[in-house]
Image (tube, rainbow, N blue to C red):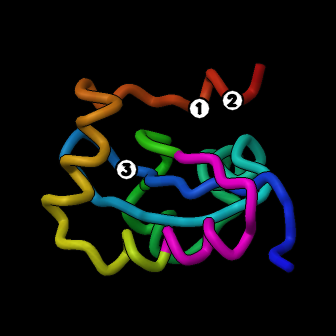
Amino acid sequence: MPRVHRCWVDILASQRNGTLYTGVTNDLARRVWEHREGFRKGFTAKYAVVRLVWCEEHRYTNNAIQREKNIKHWPRQWKINLIEAGNPDWDDLYESFIL
C-alpha cells in the first residue's frame, strides 16, 4: 500500500528562463525558505536558484518521487512550457505558501 503523505514536486528558477532545479519535498515552504536563506548548498546556491515558479501537490510519496524523476529527464523546453502554462510571468510563488 502506498504511503499517504502530502508531498510537493517543485521547480525553482534563478530568474525568468534562467537556471532550473526540480525537487520533491514534504514541506514546500520550509524547502524554499532554506534555498532562499542559503541553507541549501551546492547547485542551487551556486546559481542562485531561489524562486518557486511551479509546484504540484501529491497525495502519495511514491507518485511525487516518480513525477520529479520524470520531470528531471524532460528537455528544458518542456519544463519551461510546464511553468508557463500555470505561471506565464514566472512570478515567485513562495509567498502564497508561507501564509
User: Residue beneath label 2, please?
Assistant: 97
**Which secondary structure lies at badge 2?**
helix
Q: Nearer the viewer, residue 80 or 1?
A: 1
Q: Is residue 38 left or right of residue 54?
A: right
Mark 1: which amino acid?
Answer: Tyr
Determine the residue positioned at 74% across, 27% down: 98
Say left or right for 92 vs 7: left
Where is the N terminus found, in terms of image quarters? bottom right
Residue 93, x across and y down, in percent: 51, 29
Residue drawn at 69 percent across, 29 percent down: 97
Is disc 3 in contact with disc 2, using a CB cutoff of under 8 Å? no
- How far apart are labels 3 and 2 at the CA level? 16 Å
Relative image position of residue 30 (x, y in whole percent): 77, 47
Residue tagged by mark 3?
A: 13
Pointer 3: residues within 10 angstroms few (<14), some, or many (20+)?
many
Q: Which residues are magenta?
A: 56-68
Residue 21's label in the rendered image is none
Secondary structure mostly seen in the magenta stretch: helix
Quarter placement of the C terminus:
top right
Disc 3 or disc 2, which is closer to the eye? 2
What residue is pinned by disc 1? 94
Front residue of 5/11: it is: 5
Question: Looking at the picture, which amino acid does disc 3 mark?
Answer: Ala
Contact (Cβ within 8 Å) of mark 2 with mark 1? yes
Identify the image quadrant of residue 62.
bottom right
SS at circle 3: strand
| Circle 3/circle 1 CB separation < 8 Å | no
Residue 63 appears in the rendering? yes
Q: Nearer the viewer, residue 66 or 38?
A: 66
Three-letter amino acid code of the residue under disc 2 = Phe
